[in-house]
């Protein structure tokens, strides 16, 4: 407003902003299921921010822990329909989730994404989110959070192409520009 930009243009900009790469970034949507890449969430505090953003979450979490006990996430466990735990920190996350939110162990992000999508569709909930917000470093399986996020984006892209019901496809190249 300080630069005399019209209110409707500002509103449109906010409504269409997909997010920065790997930071609560919408990478696609099929029917009522939106896919969010928050690979930059490499600790519990960062994952907490993403969990607070959504009401119906199929959460992909895990990697190499930075020593978090993840108890700070408990206020948001009611938003988690199911968690898909990967990597070295899976047991720690499972311990924290025990009796508070359902979870399963999954060995890869591909399998976690596919299972989360299947579960989200079967639930018939509206406004569901498959959220990659690991709360852990990526070094147990990837060179860095960016490689993990790119991998998730590629997995989502393949899923979107295979389902043929693409509502939104917002994949970006490594430089952040629209593909």
Image (cartoon, rainbow, N blue to C red):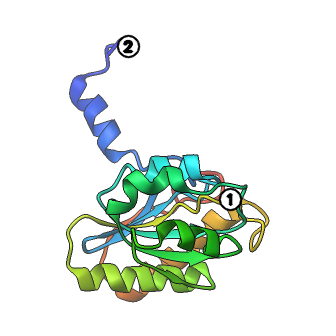
Q: How many marks?
A: 2
Local crowd size for mark 1, using a 10 Å CA cut-off: few (<14), some (14–19), many (≥20): some
Earlier in the chain: of badge 1 and badge 2, it is 2
State the residue at coordinates (34%, 46%): 16
Above or below residue 23? Residue 39 is: below
State the residue at coordinates (26%, 34%): 11
Eye-nearest disc, 1 or 2 = 1
Report the quarter where the N terminus lies.
top left
State the residue at coordinates (36%, 86%): 118
Q: Position of residue 12 (x, y in %)?
A: 27, 38
User: In terms of secondary structure, where does tag 2 sit?
Assistant: loop
State the residue at coordinates (54%, 78%): 155
Above or below residue 162? Residue 30 is: above
Residue corresponding to mark 2: 3
Residue corresponding to mark 1: 146
Decide which of 36, 159 is in the foreground and name it. Answer: 36
User: In terms of secondary structure, where does tag 1 sit?
Assistant: helix
**Horizontal side of residue 9 vs 22, given as left or right:** left
**Horizontal side of residue 177 vs 122, given as left or right:** right
Q: Position of residue 152 (x, y in %)?
A: 57, 71
- Is residue 42 in sight in this rendering? yes
**Horizontal side of residue 119 vs 97, given as left or right:** left
Numbered badge on residue 179:
none
| Residue at mark 1 to residue at mark 2: CA–CA distance | 34 Å
Local crowd size for mark 2, using a 10 Å CA cut-off: few (<14), some (14–19), many (≥20): few
Query: CB of mark 1 within 8 Å of CB of mark 2?
Result: no
- Is residue 24 in sight in this rendering? no
Place residue 102 in its image quadrant.
bottom left
Q: Position of residue 45 (x, y in %)?
A: 56, 46
Q: Position of residue 25 (x, y in %)?
A: 48, 54
């Amino acid at each position: 407003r300080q630069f005399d930009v019209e209110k409707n243009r500002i509103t449109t900009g906010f409504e269409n902003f997909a997010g920065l790469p790997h930071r609560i970034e919408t990478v696609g949507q099929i029917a009522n299921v939106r896919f969010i890449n928050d690979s930059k969430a490499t600790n519990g505090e960062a994952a907490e921010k993403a969990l607070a953003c959504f009401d119906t979450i199929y959460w992909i979490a895990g990697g190499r822990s930075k020593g978090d006990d993840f108890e700070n996430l408990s206020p948001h466990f009611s938003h988690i329909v199911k968690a898909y735990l990967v990597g070295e920190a899976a047991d720690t996350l499972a311990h924290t989730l025990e009796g508070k939110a359902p979870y399963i162990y999954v060995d890869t992000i591909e399998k976690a994404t596919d299972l989360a999508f299947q579960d989200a569709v079967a639930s018939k909930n509206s406004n569901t989110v498959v959220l990659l917000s690991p709360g852990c470093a990526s070094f147990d399986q990837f060179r860095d959070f960016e490689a993990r996020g790119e991998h998730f984006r590629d997995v989502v892209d393949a899923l979107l192409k295979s389902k043929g019901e693409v509502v939104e496809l917002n994949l970006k190249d490594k430089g952040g520009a629209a593909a």
